[in-house]
Image: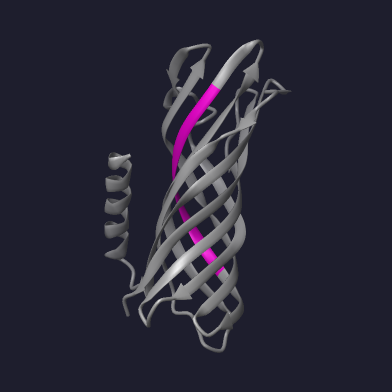
């Protein structure tokens, strides 16, 4: 866990060298995941949703007073986990994906210190850690082609901000996301979707 936090913090610091952000934010939360995996046209049955952690750093452009649309970017670390059975084998997947997303926000309402927006995101993700357990045996998913490569990451959700003062805000977000592997091969197809709840804070730096 500490190694992941250090890696994500380093990536954020590097990215901030190249952008002039108006607001930076950090969030942490939980994912509830649902895998869709098939091999040679046969879908893996009895997959169970599992909880995973999520971490996200990013920036948001200046929120306009009169216009409703604003944007941002983020880098994140998502855990997508699942368990199930296939061909009489018990399976457990524990995976961590790094991602980069562009974010678009549309302000629904603003009442004093409260701001509620609908948001969408589009980006790319790749596996950085993965472990598969089959009937007690453990295998490295980084060596499995169906889990490697780039995934298209889409999301839609709600974002709530409460301003503590002129520079610091508390965040609470809900997101529904879908991930698709860009190159499925060998008769194996992998995609997954997830529900995510996260809390965090943001700081105005300009």
Above or below, 80 against 63 in this view is above
Give percent across and percent down for residue 37. 64, 29
**Would residue 181 be visible to someone looking at this image?**
no
Q: Could you say which quadrant of the image residue 89 lies in?
A: top right
| Nearer to the camera, 25 or 99 | 25
Tell me the chief SS of the magenta region. strand
Q: Residue 13 vs residue 151: left or right?
A: left
Q: Residue 42 sits in which quadrant?
A: top right
Q: At which x and y percent is residue 200?
A: 42, 61
Give the residue displayed 58% in from the left and 42% down from the top.
32
Residue in the image at 49% along x and 18% along y: 133
In the image, residue 73 sits, relative to residue 1, either above or below, namely below
Q: How many marks?
A: 0
Quadrant (top left/top right/bottom left/bottom right) for the C terminus: bottom left
Query: Is residue 172 found inside the magenta-colored segment of the image?
Result: no
| 103 part of magenta stretch | yes
The answer to whether residue 203 of the structure is visible from this angle is yes
Q: Is residue 72 above or below residue 53?
A: below
Residue sitting nearer the eye, 102 or 6: 6
Q: Residue at x 43, y 59 (%)?
A: 74
Colour scheme = one colour
In the depicted view, which residue is nearer to us: 33 or 100? 33
- The residue lying toward the viewer, choosing from 89 and 167, is 167
Instruction: Using the image, determine if residue 68 lies above or below residue 147.
Output: below
Farthest-out residue, bottom: 66
Find the magenta span and give its range.
92-104
Find residue 82 and report its image quarter: top right
Which image quadrant: the N terminus?
top left
Q: Which residue is pictured at 39% across the width and 65% down the height?
A: 25
């Amino acid at each position: 866990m500490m190694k992941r936090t250090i890696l994500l913090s380093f990536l954020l610091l590097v990215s901030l060298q190249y952008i002039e952000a108006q607001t930076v934010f950090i969030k942490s939360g939980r994912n509830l995941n649902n895998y869709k995996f098939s091999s040679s046209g046969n879908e893996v049955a009895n997959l169970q949703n599992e909880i995973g952690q999520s971490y996200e750093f990013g920036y948001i452009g200046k929120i306009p007073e009169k216009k409703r649309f604003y944007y941002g970017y983020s880098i994140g670390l998502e855990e997508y986990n699942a368990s199930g059975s296939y061909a009489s084998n018990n399976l457990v997947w524990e995976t961590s994906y790094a991602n980069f997303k562009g974010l678009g926000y549309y302000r629904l309402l603003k009442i004093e210190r409260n701001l509620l927006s609908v948001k969408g995101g589009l980006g790319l993700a790749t596996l950085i850690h993965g472990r598969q357990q089959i009937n007690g045996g453990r295998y490295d998913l980084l060596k499995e082609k169906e889990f490697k490569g780039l995934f298209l990451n889409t999301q839609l959700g709600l974002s709530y901000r409460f301003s503590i003062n002129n520079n610091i805000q508390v965040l609470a977000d809900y997101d529904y996301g879908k991930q698709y592997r860009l190159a499925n091969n060998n008769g194996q197809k992998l995609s997954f979707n997830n529900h995510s709840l996260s809390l965090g804070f943001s700081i105005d730096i300009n």
